Amino acid sequence: MRWRLTLLNRMFAVCRLGAADPIPPWAVSGTQFTSVTRTIEELSIVCEESLVPVDHDRVERGWQALKLEGPIPFDQTGVLRSLISPLADAGVGIFAISTFDTDYVLVKAANLERAIDALCASGHDVIGT
């Protein structure tokens, strides 16, 4: 499978809050990409890094996002595997998020060049770099 990915032009952060915590207003004020997931164990937020308060204590900063150009049919198989396998082979850790239409793969900014090289070498196109 060959896919086209677009690099989003923002830095992102992954934040953890308590399961019963309300969604903070700063978390959903971004313009490019926000993901809010609540489970029984936690509230997980991915948003633009600049929005996260500097004193937030459970945060991983420095992520860049690659958007898989969709929409992708729900019955399409192997999509994430086709992206994750070359990244794993290159030693690049990921944080993946799926939406109704598409997938996003986040990599640490320090690994972005290696990630793009690995994806392109496996036949994918990355635009916005």
Image (spheres, rainbow, N blue to C red):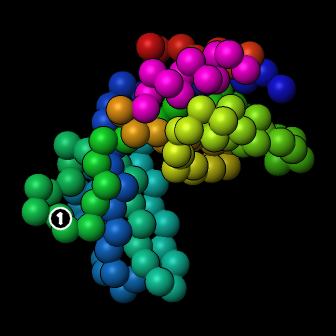
Residue at position x 47%, y 83% from top? 41
In the rendered structure, does residue 120 fall within the stretch colored magenta?
yes
Majority secondary structure in the magenta region = helix
Query: Which residue is identified by label 1?
Result: 56
Q: Name the residue furthest left.
A: 55
Residue at position x 20%, y 43% from top? 50
Looking at the image, is 100 positioned above or below residue 92? below
In the rendered structure, does residue 46 fall within the stretch colored magenta?
no
Give the x, y percent position of residue 120.
64, 16
Is residue 32 something that shows in the picture? no
Binning the other alpha carbons within 10 Å of mark 1 as few (below 14), some (14 to 19) or many (20 upward) gives: few
Which of the 4 image quarters holds residue 80?
top right
Q: Amino acid at mark 1?
A: His
Residue toward you, 103 or 82: 82
Residue toward you, 13 or 23: 13
Residue at position x 33%, y 61% from top? 15
* Residue 96 shown left or right of residue 113 in the figure: right
Which of the 4 image quarters holds residue 1?
top right
Residue at position x 53%, y 45% from top? 94
Give the x, y percent position of residue 60.
31, 55
All told, the count of numbered labels is 1
Give the x, y percent position of residue 90.
59, 32
Q: Which residues are magenta?
A: 111-122
Disc 1 secondary structure class: loop
